[in-house]
Amino acid sequence: MNASAYIGIIGGSGLYTMPGFTNPQEVRLETPWGAPSDAYMVGELGGRKVAFLARHGRGHKVSPSELNFRANIWGMKMLGVEWIISLSAVGSLKEEHRPLDFVIPDQFFDRTRGRASTFFGEGLVAHISFADPVSEELASILHEACRQAGVTSKKGGTYLCMEGPAFSTKAESAVYRSWGMDVIGMTNLQEAKLAREAEIDYATVAMVTDYDCWHPEHDAVTVDDIIANLVKNAENAAKVVAAAVAMVPAERKTKAQSALAHALLTDRKSIPEATRAKLDLIVRKYLG
């Protein structure tokens, strides 16, 4: 595999390509966890080496509950990615986060059920620190990129990750609001955990398409309205990503790059060879 990238971009609903790519190369990867959602588009964006992946596949073929999160993140690691910008369509749980606003959350709350959220197991135990699940450095870059692109954004807040694919009931939405959650989506919690295990800096741009069903005007919102917001958000996301990519430092000095340093608990002599080989890409610098 000759293709490589420094920055990864994961596009959510409404964002299946990334405008501005030069020298694009379609790269299909097979990982120990199976196939990612689609081929990676590897090329350059503003002179930086970038890999783009459509989270749900081109044509939006994979539902949130079917996503192979481990393969998607592992593929980024195989390409050499050190920073991941995740773009995700969300509903707003607060009046202040209006449709077409971008929120850059610094916390996640998990309401999914039984999704694979770790690379570890099969004889090798690891417990990463996840108190601060988002790369502060990358979140700050994304917030500044929004400012430069003229997109209203808020840095900070909590992304509630629900199972889906159905949206919330009004009762659920009311509870999430009472908890102080900011936005609701179906995909980013697993990505953030796996990126941390892979020692990749990760941050989310949560793109508000509509208010969740709690809002009194919710029933007046049509599918056409939401699609129009998806399209506009995709246009704004392309501007934000272009600005952010230019600001990502050429040399990384972050906590994420040594996330596994004190996380591997299993006695080295007890690790099964098959597991050691399977996870070699992320553990070799600690296991030799």
Image (cartoon, rainbow, N blue to C red):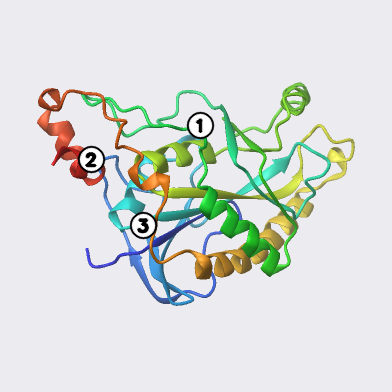
Can you tell which mark lies on residue 43? none
One can see residue 86 in this view: no
Residue bearing the label numbered 1: 131
Q: How far apart are marks 1 and 3 (CA)?
A: 23 Å
Q: Is residue 107 left or right of residue 82?
A: right
Can you tell which mark lies on residue 81? 3
| Residue that appears at 50% across and 34% down | 65
Can you tell which mark lies on residue 283? 2
| Residue that appears at 70% across and 29% down | 168
Disc 1 residue type? Ala
Image location (x, y in percent) of residue 164: 59, 32
User: Element at badge 2?
Assistant: helix
Label 2 CA crowd tier, 10 Å (few <14, some 14–19, many 20+): some
Disc 3 residue type? Val
User: Element at badge 1?
Assistant: loop
Q: Which of marks 3 and 2 is nearer the N terminus?
A: 3
One can see residue 148 in this view: yes
Does 145 appear above or below 284? below
Label 3 CA crowd tier, 10 Å (few <14, some 14–19, many 20+): many
255 or 4: nearer the viewer: 255
Q: Which of marks 1 and 2 is in front?
A: 1
| Residue that appears at 56% across and 69% down | 242
Disc 2 residue type? Val
- The number of numbered badges drawn on the structure is 3
